[in-house]
Image (spheres, grey):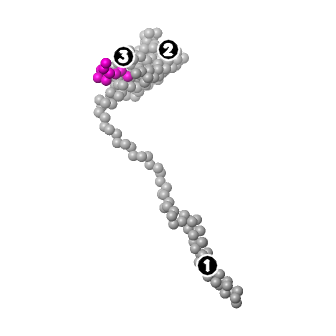
Amino acid sequence: MMRTTRLNRFATATLPLLLALGTSAIATAQGGSHAQAPTPHMKSVAPAAKPSKARSPEAVRADRVKSFAGIAKKLNTTTDALQTAYEAAQQANPKLTRGQFIAANVLAQNLGSKNAAITTQAILDGLKSGKSIGQTLQSLGLSASDAKQAQKAADQDVANAKKAAKTSPKAQSPATKPSN
């Protein structure tokens, strides 16, 4: 009987301890009382776009004019003249891109002295009819390989003009020149 009493005392003393440990182990396994609530699974959303400042058409046009700065020097014209010509060409062909317009001008300058049929307008007309620049040059008398070579040279000229425009020092306005 003594043995049963000891066992009963042991059981009554350790049972709450075992229950507490078991409950603690279960709570820990489930995330415990300090666990955060699970986050819902949602698609990430891009941050809200910053409200853009409304720009006047004149400001937009001024930026576009500036983008012709490098190539205008190569073509011996002004940025305003190029922008005006581009706007007129785009009225005639709404699908015309700035790149195509610039390429047409550079190609006409590079090839016009060798072939009088190759003019900016002739290239723009070919683009308007749905031809590529290469197809247009071929229809104006160049071979396929000469047209490809001319396009590569024009692309290089445009890249060099952009690079020169970025690296050339900005001219100081009279108001910002240091006085002596």
Would residue 2 be seen by someone viewing this image from the given angle? yes
Would residue 120 be seen by someone viewing this image from the given angle? no
The x, y position of residue 179, in whole percent, is 30, 20
The x, y position of residue 108, in whole percent, is 43, 15
Indicate left or right for 30 with 56 as reference.
Answer: right
Which numbered disc flags the more N-terminal residue, 1 or 3?
Answer: 1
Q: On the image, which quarter does residue 167 sit in?
A: top left
Prevalent SS, magenta region = loop
Q: Report if residue 23 lies within the magenta region.
A: no
Q: Report if residue 179 lies within the magenta region.
A: yes
Decide: few, some or many residues near mark 2? Use Cα within 10 Å; few <14, some 14-19, many ≥20. some
Q: Which residue is mark 2?
A: 142
Q: Which residue is mark 3?
A: 77
Amino acid under disc 2: Leu
Decide: few, some or many residues near mark 1? Use Cα within 10 Å; few <14, some 14-19, many ≥20. few
**Is the Cβ of the residue at disc 2 closer than 8 Å to that at disc 3?**
no
Which numbered disc flags the more N-terminal residue, 2 or 3?
Answer: 3
The residue shown at (36%, 25%) is 66
- Pair 1/2: label in front: 1
The x, y position of residue 94, in whole percent, is 37, 28
The residue shown at (33%, 19%) is 81
Indicate left or right for 43 with 82 as reference.
Answer: right
Real-space CA distance between mark 1 and mark 3, rounded to the nearest whole angstrom: 97 Å
Amino acid under disc 1: Leu
* SS at circle 1: helix
* SS at circle 3: loop
Residue lying furthest front in this view? 180
Instruction: Using the image, determine if residue 41 lies above or below residue 174.
Output: below
